[in-house]
Amino acid sequence: MTQTMKAAVFNRYGDVDVLHIADIPRPTISAGQILVKVHAAAINPKDTFIRKGRFKRFTGNDFPKTTGFDFSGVVAESQVADLSVGTPVFGMLDGWHGATCAEYVVATGEQVAIKPDNVSFVEATAIPLVGLTALQALRDEGGLRENANQSVCINGASGGVGTMAVQIAKRYGAKVTAIASERNHDFLRELGADYCIDYRQTDITLTNSQFDIFFDVFGNINYRDAKPILTPSGTWVSTVLKLHVFASLMLSRFTRQSARLVVVKANCADLQELGEWLAVGAVRAIIYETYPLADIQSAHSQQQTKHTRGKLVVKIP
């Protein structure tokens, strides 16, 4: 096996033009890790934020940096007992150092699950980060329960996390309201949304709606504004690391209503469940477009438009 690999890298923070393809050392594994020959990776808002330097407090100033957190592929080397060489897997890296837009990536056993046979590598790589975020936000932070007749509102329902959240909420038997532009309403109804609201025409916080869970994926409706549309013990869940979110977490400690922040973590059991749902058609991967690794700049450019329905996938040659 060659000791170098091709990967998308950047040598400074900046716009998409800092990204390029380079030959870098192929990573090595240690106890509890696997080396995956990557077939496909995916792009998330997290990747573009890191590339711009928004989270340099966590990512530091050491370069070059690689990018990408979702991946699917085949185990090339293994020091994990139940993941032998040749096993098809999909998963997500934790932390702030992306590395999946490359020919090989190192992962732990907890960061992957075995890919179902009837799910393609492209489909599998579109699931981990968005699926885990939606599942952990709704179930763990929001208190979503099976067939509990709960009402869920998803703000930013047409993006990667939002489309998964709609499907997962319906999988749990909830009544789902999706907030997105009108052009996405028919599509969201196909995914199971019971009601759709165009944010350009209706301010959800000024309606008489009542929700057990308000999942603010887009990040523009804060806890204070959402409180009137929460049930007496309802929960507002955010995905964004902003000061108003942390202030809301403290404020809600003194009320029956609650504010929660989802910090997604790779979890083998959750990934396995998502894979099983995908295999039987209980959820489906929503893929907006695929790109070759060489066109990584275009993938990041599209992600930055904030008008991507579902996920962007990068195929690794």
Image (cartoon, rainbow, N blue to C red):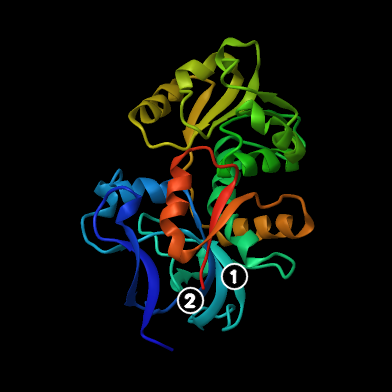
Name the residue rendered at 56%, 15% in the picture.
Answer: 203
Name the amino acid, label 2.
Ile
Task: Answer with left or right where residue 26 lies relative to residue 291.
Answer: left
On-image quarter of the N terminus: bottom left
Q: Residue 226, percent across and down?
A: 52, 19
**Judging from the image, what secondary structure is the residue with disc 1 in?**
strand
Q: Residue 176, percent across and down?
A: 70, 30
Vertical comparison of 115 with 199: above or below: below
Name the residue rendered at 44%, 65% in the picture.
Answer: 294
Residue tagged by mark 1? Answer: 89
Query: Which image quadrant for residue 178?
Result: top right
Closest to the observer, 144 or 288: 288
- The label shown at residue 273 is none
Closest to the observer, 158 or 165: 158
User: Do the numbered discs 2 and 1 sit on residues whose CB atoms are within 8 Å?
Assistant: yes
Task: Answer with left or right where residue 281 lies relative to residue 111.
Answer: right
Query: Which image quadrant for residue 196?
Result: top right
Task: Answer with left or right where residue 307 lies relative to residue 147.
Answer: left
Closest to the observer, 237 or 24: 24
| Count of numbered circles in the view | 2
Name the residue rendered at 26%, 64% in the picture.
Answer: 64
Vertical comparison of 232 with 55: above or below: above
Vertical comparison of 59 with 170: above or below: below
**Separation (CA) of disc 2 from disc 1:** 10 Å
Name the amino acid, label 1.
Val
Q: Around disc 1, counting alpha carbons within 10 Å, would you say few (fewer than 14), some (14 to 19), or many (20 or more)? A: many
- The label shown at residue 34 is 2
Q: Residue 37, percent across and down?
A: 51, 76
